[in-house]
Structures are given as structure tokens and as C-alpha cells.
């Protein structure tokens, strides 16, 4: 009989297991269906693992879908996560936009540190798949593909549905539903966007990457993006994908992209006048292939004296509001995080315990919690895991 069984050996489950053993001396079993722990952690941040983001908590909350984790972040937030890994001997660095990575650029170092801490506090780790959870009086019976375990507390840390090749299951949602928790609509989030526009289908702009654009649809995000063979991708595109997902319910979505957010229309016009050529002016600011596409589309290849005011306005509009029509999103196999999940209204944010089932906890991505790209999702996983383990 264990005190605590944690289902799912990703960052949220590992942290819940460590914390329950470390602070409360609990006998803990962590059950992970993959042969190794933290497979998603290992591919995070392109293998570099953007482990947290050092924005102040109030600023951090602007990048998360709900204010729910405010309390958990106060228990164990970005600064505590930074300190925790440094204390375990993983040196960290802060990059642009407050993103934190290991100095080694190796996600493996983060995972190894967590595994060492699991061992230090005597957490048992079994590699089995949990099939079912039953509550019988005050105890839980956890059935795996090999055996049945009993425990007093259960932490569900099964993650979301993204990257199915890394072990995603619906088990967490099934446990939640079985005990009458609401599971909100699930969808791939932070995912690339697919377009049927001619210039995408013809691969005219494929491979062009832009360091700094503003993408607008209902709200706006600024940062890098890339044109691909199927549509568009890159951090800024991933960040706007949630709005696009909901917009697509009413048909294709038109995104407007400001290709030069730091250059005002008048400034661009002055530059074109100074050089007497649209192409020459734009080539100083944008990739050549994109410039050729724009001047051909707006018919502004000639000397400036031959370009009508109308065409010039069309050109300026295309640079400041480049339109791309989005028809669909890439699915779970390409998404960074799952939108939707176990409803936050069913969970106590101070402890992560279910409001309806005593001693049952939910942490990490299985919840209806998601952040933008930049270290927010791993922070949520670690912070909610810590809070559950601590309160158990
Ligand atoms: C490609 C990619 C890159 C990312 N990069 C970043 C980044 O740099 N920074 C960031 O903040 N976030 C990043 N994320 C998101 C982040 O990795 C996740 O939000 C985070 O891993 C969620 O942690 P978790 O513990 O809740 O779930 P997971 O990490 O998904 O762990 C859940 C675990 O539960 C196990 N499991 C599931 N069902 C069962 C079952 N029935 N029995 C036993 N075990 C089970 C799974 O095998 C899995 O190991 C990235 C995601 C992806 C896909």
C-alpha cells in the first residue's frame, strides 16, 4: 500500500512525486507507461528545454489562458524553479523575452536532475500503463496493464494529447469524467497553420523566415514566423493559433501580417521616393523573394513616376497588412500543447485537489490550462505538481 500514486512521469508528475516524498515523507509510487520518464520534456524547446520564464507573476499571467495558477505560481513559480534546478547543479541562463534554458542547452540535464531527486527521496518508479482508477471507500485501486496497486492519494499527471508518439493517452480525461468532472473541448494548441492560398500551394514563399512581424487576428502577436510548404509556422504563428482554431468554426480565417512593424507607412513611402524604386527600398528591409512577390502582386515594378497613387497604396497595404487565408490547423502531432482539459472550476487552486473527490488531484497539461510559447507550460506543470505534492 502506497500513500500516494502519481500517474504520469512528465514534469508535473515527477514534481508532485518528489514534493510529496520530500516535504511529507510519503511513500510514493510514480507510474509511467513509457520506458523512460519525461519524454516530452526531452524534446521541449527543440531539445534545449525552455524550462521557465522569469517574468513577474502578474506579467506571466498574461501568457496563460486563466488566472487559476496564480496561487500555485506563488508557491513555486519561475524564481523558485530557477533556484531549484541551480541547487540541483543545473546551471541556467536567461535568454530573450525572459526565457530560461540550461546553459548546456541539453534538456537531458533537466530530466537527469529530476530523476536524481526522485531517487534521493525514495520515490518508486514503475513503467506500466494505468488502465483504470477506482475509489473504494477511502482508498484508491489503481489497475495497470500488469497489476493493481492501492493508495490513499492519487495524482493524475497524464498530460495532454499532443505528440502522440511520445505516449499521450486519454486516461486522465477518462478518470476525470468517471468521477463527474467536466472536461472542456480539447484541441491542438500552439500549432502551425495551413493555407490553401495560391502562393502557398505554389511554394512561392516556402522557406522565407521573418525575424519580426506582427500577426493580427482578434488580437496581435509580435515575433518571428516562417512560410512553409503547407502554410505558416514559428513562435508568433503558434501563439495566435488558439484564436484561429475558434475562428475557423465560422469558415476560413484571414490573418493580417505587418511585415515591418517598426516602419510607418509614411517612412516607407519616403524611402521609396528617395530611391525612386519600390524594389530597392523594400530589398533593404525584407527578403528578396518576398519583395519580388509583393511588387509583382501590386504591379509596382516600374520607376516610381509611373506608379499610380492607387497602386502605391495597395503596395503599402500589402506590406503593413499582408493577408493570408487559413483553412485549418496542424493537428496534435505538431501541436505544443493541448487546449481544453479538466475544468478548472472542479479543482481547488490552493491544493490541486478535486472539489468533488477527496484525495484525488489533477496537475499539469491534463487541466484546462495552457500557456503561449516561452516556458509557460513547463512552469505550469512544475508549479501545479509542486502544489499537489506539497498539500498531500
Ligand atoms: C515539441 C514540444 C516542445 C515543447 N517545448 C516546450 C518548452 O520549451 N517550454 C515549455 O514550457 N513547454 C514546452 N512544451 C510543452 C510541455 O512540454 C508540456 O506542457 C509539459 O510536458 C506538460 O507536462 P505534464 O507533466 O503535464 O505532461 P507530459 O509531459 O505529457 O507527461 C505526461 C506523462 O504521462 C504519461 N502517461 C499518460 N497516460 C498514462 C497512463 N495511462 N499510464 C501511465 N502513464 C501515462 C505519458 O507517457 C507522459 O510521460 C513543449 C511541447 C512539445 C510537444
Image (spheres, rainbow, N blue to C red):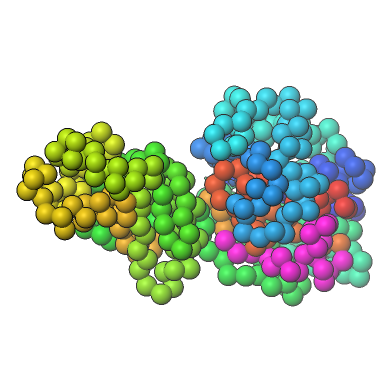
Indicate the position of residue 300 as horizontal and vertical percent values. Answer: 13, 48
> Residue at image x 20%, y 40%?
272
Establish if 20 lies above or below 338.
above
In the depicted view, which residue is nearer to us: 278 or 23?
278
Q: Is residue 218 left or right of residue 120?
A: left
Extent of the magenta region: 339-358
In the depicted view, which residue is nearer to us: 273 or 223?
273
Q: Is residue 213 left or right of residue 282?
A: right
Q: Is residue 43 left or right of residue 323?
A: right
Numbered marks: total = 0
Residue 269 quadrant:
top left
> Residue at image x 76%, y 69%?
346
Residue 212 at least partly seen: yes
> Residue at image x 71%, y 40%?
78
Q: Is residue 247 left or right of residue 90?
A: left
Establish if 75 lies above or below 327.
above
Establish if 66 lies above or below 383.
below
Q: Main secondary structure of the magenta part?
A: loop
Amino acid at each position: 500500500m502506497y500513500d500516494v500514486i502519481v500517474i504520469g512521469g512528465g514534469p508535473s508528475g515527477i514534481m508532485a512525486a518528489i514534493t510529496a516524498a520530500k516535504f511529507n515523507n510519503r511513500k510514493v509510487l510514480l507510474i509511467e507507461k513509457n520506458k523512460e520518464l519525461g519524454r516530452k520534456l526531452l524534446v521541449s524547446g527543440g531539445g534545449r528545454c525552455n524550462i521557465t520564464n522569469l517574468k513577474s507573476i502578474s506579467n506571466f499571467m498574461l501568457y496563460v489562458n486563466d488566472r487559476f495558477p496564480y496561487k500555485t505560481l506563488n508557491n513555486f513559480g519561475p524564481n523558485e524553479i530557477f533556484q531549484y534546478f541551480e541547487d540541483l547543479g543545473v546551471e541556467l541562463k536567461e535568454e530573450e523575452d525572459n526565457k530560461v534554458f540550461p546553459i548546456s542547452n541539453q534538456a537531458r540535464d533537466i530530466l537527469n536532475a529530476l530523476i536524481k531527486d526522485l531517487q534521493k527521496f525514495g520515490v518508486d518508479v514503475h513503467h506500466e500503463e494505468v488502465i483504470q482508477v477506482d475509489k473504494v471507500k477511502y482508498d484508491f485501486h489503481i489497475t495497470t496493464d500488469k497489476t493493481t496497486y492501492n493508495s490513499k492519494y492519487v495524482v493524475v499527471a497524464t498530460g495532454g494529447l499532443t505528440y502522440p508518439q511520445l505516449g499521450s493517452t486519454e486516461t486522465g480525461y477518462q478518470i476525470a469524467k468517471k468521477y463527474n468532472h467536466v472536461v472542456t473541448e480539447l484541441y491542438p494548441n500552439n500549432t502551425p497553420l495551413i493555407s490553401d492560398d495560391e502562393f502557398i500551394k505554389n511554394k512561392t514563399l516556402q522557406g522565407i523566415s521573418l525575424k519580426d512581424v506582427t500577426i493580427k487576428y482578434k488580437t496581435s502577436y509580435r515575433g518571428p514566423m516562417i512560410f512553409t510548404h503547407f502554410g505558416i509556422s514559428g513562435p508568433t504563428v503558434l501563439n495566435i493559433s488558439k484564436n484561429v482554431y475558434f475562428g475557423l468554426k465560422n469558415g476560413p480565417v484571414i490573418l493580417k501580417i505587418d511585415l515591418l512593424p517598426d516602419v510607418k507607412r509614411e517612412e516607407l513611402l519616403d524611402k521609396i521616393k528617395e530611391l525612386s524604386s519600390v524594389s530597392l527600398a523594400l530589398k533593404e528591409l525584407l527578403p528578396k523573394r518576398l519583395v519580388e512577390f509583393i511588387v509583382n502582386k501590386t504591379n509596382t515594378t516600374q520607376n516610381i513616376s509611373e506608379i499610380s497613387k492607387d497602386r502605391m497604396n495597395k503596395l503599402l497595404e500589402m506590406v503593413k497588412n499582408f493577408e493570408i487565408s487559413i483553412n485549418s490547423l496542424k493537428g496534435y502531432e505538431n501541436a505544443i500543447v493541448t487546449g481544453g482539459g479538466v475544468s478548472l472550476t472542479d479543482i481547488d487552486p490552493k491544493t490541486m485537489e478535486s472539489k468533488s473527490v477527496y484525495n484525488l488531484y489533477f496537475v499539469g497539461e491534463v487541466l484546462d490550462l495552457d500557456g503561449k510559447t516561452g516556458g509557460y507550460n513547463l512552469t505550469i506543470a512544475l508549479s501545479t505538481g509542486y502544489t499537489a505534492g506539497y498539500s498531500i
